Image (tube, helix red, strand yellow):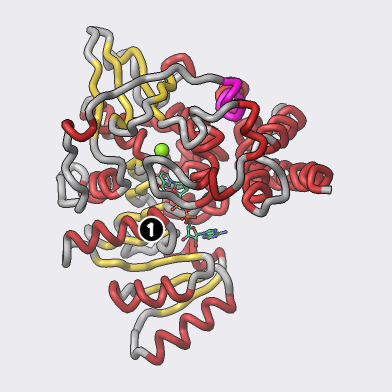
Amino acid sequence: MLNSLVILGASGSIGQSTLKVLRQNPGRWQVLALTAARSVDAMLRDCLEFSPRFAVMVDETAAGELAERLKTHGASTRVLSGQAALCEVAAHPEAHSVMAAIVGAAGLAPTMAAVRAGKRILLANKEALVMSGAFFMEAVRHHGAELLPIDSEHNAIFQCLPESIQRQPGFCDLAEAGISKILLTGSGGPFRYTDIGDLDKVTPAQAVAHPNWSMGAKISVDSATMINKGLEYIEARWLFNAAPEQIQVVIHPQSVIHSMVQYKDGSVLAQLGNPDMCTPIAHALAYPGRIESGVEPLDFFSVGEFSFIRPDYERYPNLALAMTACQQGQAATTSLNAANEESVAAFLAERIGFMDIAMVNESIMTALGGCAAGSLDDLIALDGMARARAHELIEELAR
Ligand code: NAD
Ligand code: MG
C-alpha cells in the first residue's frame, strides 16, 4: 500500500516528529509498525493513538510489559521483540515507506533490511550510512530502493538539486549537472563562542542544550563537538556522490538556511525554514508532493540577519577528524563512528570530559583506520573492534 509506513525509532526525537506530521494529515498514512528500544509508556500511548499492526521493542521484558498493557486496553497491535523483529517489520511486504530513525550503528541492520526489500527509505540514521558507505549505496541501487534524506542539511541539498538527480542522487555526476559545490551549513552548536580553554569543563547538560534545534542526546553532543557536521560531510559524500572537495562546511549560527548548492553559472540555491525537523520529514513523506508539516512559516523580519563563519578546527577537532576520515576511506569512517558512539556515551555518563571525546576518537581512528574494509562483515567486525578499544581507553581515562 502506498501509504503504509514503518517508523524505526518511533519513541525518539525524529520518531515523535514523524508522528506529529502524521497528526497534521489525518487518514493519509497507515502506520504498519512502530519500534523502540525500551520506552513502554511512549509506545503504549502511540500504539493506542495510531493502532499499528506491529509494535517492536528491542528489549524482551519491555515487549512483555507493552503486550500486557495493550491487552488491558483491548488493542489489537501485535508486540514483537528483538533485532530480528526490527528487520522483519522493516522489510514487511505491505510496508511502502520506512522512516529509519534509530540512533547509531544499531540502525544499520533494520535499515539495510528495508533497503534489500526495495522500500522507500526516509533516512535519518546517518550513522548507518557513515558506517557502511559504498555497501549501503550499492544495496540501494541493486535492490531498487529509494533514498530520501531526512537530515535537514541533506534534505535541503536534495531540494536544491535538479529533478533528474533527485531520482538517483547517489549515482549522479554533480559536475555534469553544472554543480560546483555543496555548501553544508551548521550552527556551530552551543559552544561556538565559548573560550577554547574552557571547553574541557563543559557538562553534559550544557552540551545537550542546543541553541536552535531540539534533538536526541547523542546527536546534541555530536552537534556541540561538530562531529555531527563531519558525519554529515561523509553522509553527503555518499548520498550525492560528492568528492570531498565538492563539499564545504559553512557555519551559519541562525540555522535558517539548511544548506545550499552552488552552480557553475554563479547561482546558489538554498532551502530555508524554521529549524524544525517536521519540515524535512513532511517533505520526504509526501515527495514529490507537499503537505502540511505544522511548522510556523518563516518570518524574515524576526530573523533579521544572516551570518556565516569559517569553521575553526582548533575549537572543533572532531570536525577535522571526520573530514580526514572521509578522505582516508571506509575503515577510517567506520572506526571513527564506532569510537564516537562510545566516547559520547561515556561523556553523557560523566565518565570522561568533553575534550576527551576527540582524543578517544582520534586514537581509535589512527589505530584502526587502515584495517580491512572489503565487505559489510569486515565493517561490522571493525565496528566491534573499535568499540572494544574505545572502552579500554575510556576505562583508563575514567580512572
Ligand atoms: P533519539 O535518541 O531521540 O531516539 C532514538 C530512537 O532509537 C529511539 O526510539 C530509541 O528507542 C531507538 N533505539 C535506541 N537504541 C536502539 C537500539 N540499540 N536498537 C533499536 N532501537 C534503538 O535519537 P534522534 O535524535 O531521534 O535521532 C535518530 C537518528 O536521526 C540519529 O541517527 C540522528 O543522527 C538522526 N537525526 C536526528 C535529528 C534530530 O533532530 N533529532 C536530525 C537529523 C538527524
Ligand atoms: Mg543535520
Tell me the residue at 57%/20% (across/down): 313
Q: Position of residue 162 (x, y in %)?
A: 22, 25
- Disc 1 residue crowd, few under 14, some 14–19, many 20+, Cα 10 Å: many
Q: Position of residue 94 (x, y in %)?
A: 31, 64
Q: Position of residue 203 (x, y in %)?
A: 61, 45
Residue 168 seen in the figure: no
Tell me the residue at 72%/36% (across/down): 360
Q: Position of residue 120 (x, y in %)?
A: 32, 49
Q: Quadrant of ligand 2?
A: top left
Left or right relative to 347: residue 300: left
Element type at marker 1? Answer: helix
Q: Residue 392 or 264: which is nearer the viewer?
A: 392
Query: Which three-letter amino acid code belongs to the residue tagged 1?
Result: Gly
Above/below status of 98 relative to 336: below
Tell me the residue at 30%/14% (across/down): 176
Asked if the residue at label 1 sits under 8 Å from ligand 1, the reply is yes
Left or right relative to 102: residue 308: left
Which stretch is magenta?
A: 313-321
Q: Residue 187 or 49: which is nearer the viewer?
A: 187
Left or right relative to 3: residue 125: right
Tell me the residue at 56%/34% (across/down): 225
Residue 118 seen in the figure: yes
The N terminus, quarter of image: bottom left
Left or right relative to 394: residue 201: left
Residue occupied by mark 1: 15
Residue 58, quarter of picture: bottom right
Q: Residue 220 or 126: which is nearer the viewer?
A: 220
Query: Is residue 276 in the magenta section?
Result: no
